[in-house]
Amino acid sequence: MSLYEKGAVTGVGETKYLRGTDRTALSFQLEASLNAIRDAGLKPTDIDGLIPYGHGAVAEDFITNFGIKDLRFSATTPMGGASAVASIQCALAVIDAGICKHVLISLGRTGYSGGRIGTRVQQMPQFRTIGEFEMPLGAIAPAQLYAPMARRHMELYGTTSRQLAEIAVTTRYHASLQPNATMKNPMTIEDHQASRMISDPLRLLDCSLESDGGAAVVISAPDVARDLAKRPIMVMGVAEGHPDSPSAITQRPDLTTLGLAKAAPKAFAMAGITPGDIDVAEVYDCFTYIVMCQLEDLGFCKKGEGGGFVENGALGLNGRLPVNTHGGLLSQAHMAGMNHIVELTRQLRGEAAAQVTDAEIGLVTGYGDMGDGALAIMRRG
Amino acid sequence: MSDYEKLVPSPTADTQPYWTGLQEGRLCLQACADCGKVRHYPRPVCDSCYSMNVKWVEASGQGKVHSWTITHYAFHPGFKGELPYILVTVDLDEGVRMNAQVRGITQADLRVGLPVKVGYDKVKDDLTLPVFERVSS
C-alpha cells in the first residue's frame, strides 16, 4: 500500500495578500476556495471532502456558503504550519479509500489585523505544558522558543547570522517578482544584519510576516484529475513526521532535528526519487533558520552543513536549489504554508511569476507547532 | 507584589509538587515510582514502563548550559521592563532539561557547557520561579 500518485493537485487559489483589512478570515477563506475550485474547472458543489486549517472556517461554513448537498468527509490536521501539507496526505488517503473525488484544503486568516502571534500561541491547547512551565519565565513566542535551536546549531556547527541572511535576501528577491506579495523592497545582507534583534540569534528579518488573506488547493482523484481545466500535478510522495518531545523544544533530545527528518525518507521512498531529482523546493519559512534546518533534514546536505549550502545565492532561481520562489512566509505573506503548495503547483504547471526553467519535479514542506513536519513531492502530470 | 503583570502558571494535580517545591526553595522533579526514570515536564505516564505511579525527587539543581536566547522584544507587556533578558536551556545532572532566566550571568559568559545551579526568585507571595546562577569556583 502506498499513496504514490493516488491524487493530484487540480486547482489552486489565493486572495490578494494584505497587511491590514476589515474583512473576516472566513471571507478570505471562502474567496480563496472559490478561486481554487474555479481554477480546477469545478463547481463548489463538486467538492465532497473538506480539510480546513484549524482555528478557522469549519465544514458547516462551506456547506452553508457553497450549497454542498452531499459532503462525505471533513477533518482537520492539527499540526500548525505543517497542517496544509499534512492535509495532502489525509486527502490522498480518503481519495484512495474511495470516499471522495475532490478534497478542498483551505486557509483564511487575519494574522495582521486580528490577534497577533504573541497572544495567539498562549491560547492553543497543544501548548499547555509550555504555557505552564516556560511562558511564565518569559519564553512566550515562537521566535524565543526556536532561537535556542538556532543558537545550538551555531555553537555546534559554526553557522552564522550572515548565512541565515542569505535565505532572507533570496526570498525577498523572489517576492519582488510577484504580483501578489506584501514585502517587495530590495533587501541586502547588510540590511538583514542591521535589523533589530528580536530574540538572539534571530533578527527582525529572520522572522516571517503576519498577514491577512486566504489560500486554498483542490486535490482530486487521479482518474478525474486528467479531465479538468489544468494539467494535473501528481503527488508522488507524502508523509508527516512528529519530533520527540513535540510540544516542548526544551526537552527534545536533539534540538537541531525537526519532525521533517522522520517524514523525508518515507516521502522520498514513496516517490522513488532522491533529493538530487528536485528542481524546485517550497520550504516552510516561519524563520530563516527553520528553512536551513529543513534543507538538512530533507537530505540536501548533511546535518551541520546547511549554512554553507545556502551561501552565494544557492537558493535563487538559477541556484543549485531554487527555494521559495514566491517569496514565502518571509516576504510574500504568512498563509501557514498554503501559499507554498499554490506556488509549487504553479511552478510545475509552468505558470509561476518567477518560473524555474523546466521545473518538472518539486517538493513542498510544512513545519509547525514547535517541530511537526510534513512533506509532499510532486511532478508535472 | 499585587501588581504582578506577567503570565502565571496554572498548576494541576500532576504538576503542583513542582511549584510547591520551588516555593520551599527546592527543585523537585517527577520520577516514576516503579522504574525510577526522572521526567520533566511533569505528566501522568512514564514513557519507559507506562506506570502511572509517581514520586517526587529533590534534584541537585546543578547543570550545564545546552543553549540560550537573549530576548530584545517584549512579546507580553509584563516583560517590557526587563529587556533584554537571557533565557538558558540547561541539561540538569538528573538527565532532563530546564528553561529559566539567569541571575548574575551575562551574554559574555554564555557558552555550551557552562556550569550553572538553580536559584529561586520569589516574584509574588504565591509564586517562586527558578533562575540559573553561576557556580562559584
Image (tube, coloured by chain):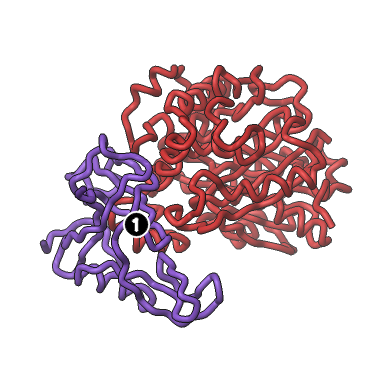
Relative vertical location of residue A10 with respect to residue B18 in this rendering, above or below: above
The residue drawn where x is 30% and y is 71% is B58
- Location of residue A24 in the rendering, given as x and y in whole percent from the top left corner: 47, 48
The residue tagged 1 is: A134
Side of A95 relative to A289 (left or right) = right
Colour of chain B in the image: purple
Q: Which chain is red?
A: A
Residue A350: x %, y % from top left: 75, 25
**Residue ID at (72%, 53%):** A103
The answer to which of A166 and A49 lies nearer the viewer is: A166
The structure residue drawn at horizontal position 59% and vertical position 26%, both measured from the top left corner, is A309
Q: Answer left or right for A61 relative to B11.
A: right
In the image, residue A50 above or below residue A155? below
Place of residue A249 in the rendered image (x, y in percent of width and height, measured from the top left): 45, 53
Foreground pick, A115 / A170: A170
Q: Chain of mark 1?
A: A
Q: Residues within 10 Å of mark 1 (few under 14, many from 20)?
A: many
SS class, disc 1: loop
User: x%, y% of residue B24?
Assistant: 19, 72
Q: Is residue A208 left or right of residue B78?
A: right
Label tally:
1
Residue found farthest to the front: B137
Q: Nearer the viewer, residue B92 or A96?
A: B92
| Badge 1 amino acid | Glu
